[in-house]
Amino acid sequence: MSVPLLELSHVTRSFGGVHATRDVSLTLKQGEVIGLIGPNGAGKSTLVNVITGVHPPSSGQIMHNGERIDGMKPFQVAARGIARTFQVVQPFPAMTVIENVMAGSLFGSRIRSMSQAREAAAEHLRFTGLLTLAERPASELTLANRKRLELAKSLAMSPKLLMLDEVNAGLNTAEVDQALELIRKIAATGVTVLIIEHLLKVVLTLCSRVIVLHHGELIADDTPSNIVRNEAVIKAYLGARFAEKYRDSHE
Ligand code: ADP
Ligand code: MG
């Protein structure tokens, strides 16, 4: 049996008295596309922060390719090929689009010269559909393109595992479809992708497995077709979402 790409064992992260993540155990295998869902405040972003070393776990253990990574600094985790996008996109606004991506490649990968970084960045911009905007200041980009830039920056770190924190939030239907295509393209290159997502359509069409958090605890880890039939998940999350959609479409 091969070693999982990532293995969390009984991971808890508390902030004061709040267990943002509570006793979470899960494994991610190389090449999987996994959804991570749950209500606001369920601990999804915290889990990504814990994996990437932003907030070390209060207890529990994280293994990457069979080696412990809990306690490592974010740059050390990034250097192992674990990248993420932020829920709130944070480009360097004064820098051009291509400079933003170059910063990513100099930070995370083995690229060490500026010309090499520029060449690699141009390739990531081509892949994400941003090449024509390469020389524009990042501050001029639309939200959809800022999200693409986040993806390009993450790809510049040559990730083996890419975690996407609500990359589709705030996008319109056409933009979500384009983002879906891009995520599919990334997954097709063999990168393991963990998607935090409120849009069930995205999760159910892209992911082979869905993990559900509620009050920091993992309440389900199953195929999409089982997830939509899971009583605990319907009660904690899907019911509320459907109700919200219903209200939205009847207002
Ligand atoms: P989600 O991404 O699922 O919406 P979060 O992981 O952002 O949820 O938050 C989970 C819980 O942890 C919330 O109660 C939130 O207020 C708390 N939390 C997250 N990050 C911090 C932090 N840096 N300091 C204090 N509390 C935090
Ligand atoms: Mg979040």
Image (cartoon, rainbow, N blue to C red):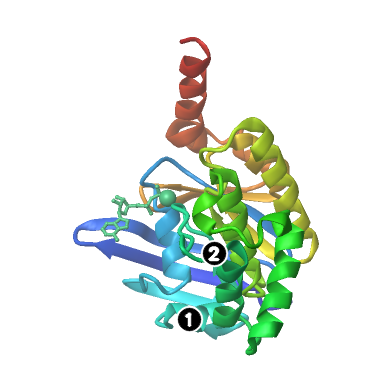
Q: Furthest residue to the right?
A: 188
Residue 4 sits above or below residue 97 on the image: below
Q: Amino acid at mark 2?
A: Arg
Along the viewing direction, whichever of 90 and 211 lies nearer the viewer = 90
**Quadrant including the N terminus:** bottom right
- Residue drawn 59% across the image and 66% down it: 153
- Residue drawn 56% across the image and 68% down it: 100
Residue for badge 2: 84
Question: Do we see residue 225 in this rendering?
Answer: no
Cα distance between the residues tagged 2 and 1? 12 Å
Query: Going by the image, does 179 lie left or right of 36?
Result: right
Residue density around tag 2, few if under 14, some if 14–19, many if 20 or more, within 10 Å: many
Q: How far from the left and from the top, in percent, is residue 106?
A: 58, 81
Question: Do we see residue 147 in this rendering?
Answer: yes
Query: Going by the image, does 19 lie left or right of 177?
Result: left
Residue 48 sits above or below residue 210 on the image: below
Residue for badge 1: 75
Residue contact between numbered discs 2 and 1, judged by CB atoms under 8 Å:
no
Q: Amino acid at mark 1?
A: Phe
The quarter holding residue 73 reads bottom left
Along the viewing direction, whichever of 193 and 122 lies nearer the viewer = 122
Q: Earlier in the sequence, mark 2 or mark 1?
A: 1
For label 1, being within 8 Å of ligand 1 is answered no
Q: How far from the left and from the top, in percent, is residue 109?
A: 63, 82
Q: How far from the left and from the top, in percent, is residue 178?
A: 71, 42
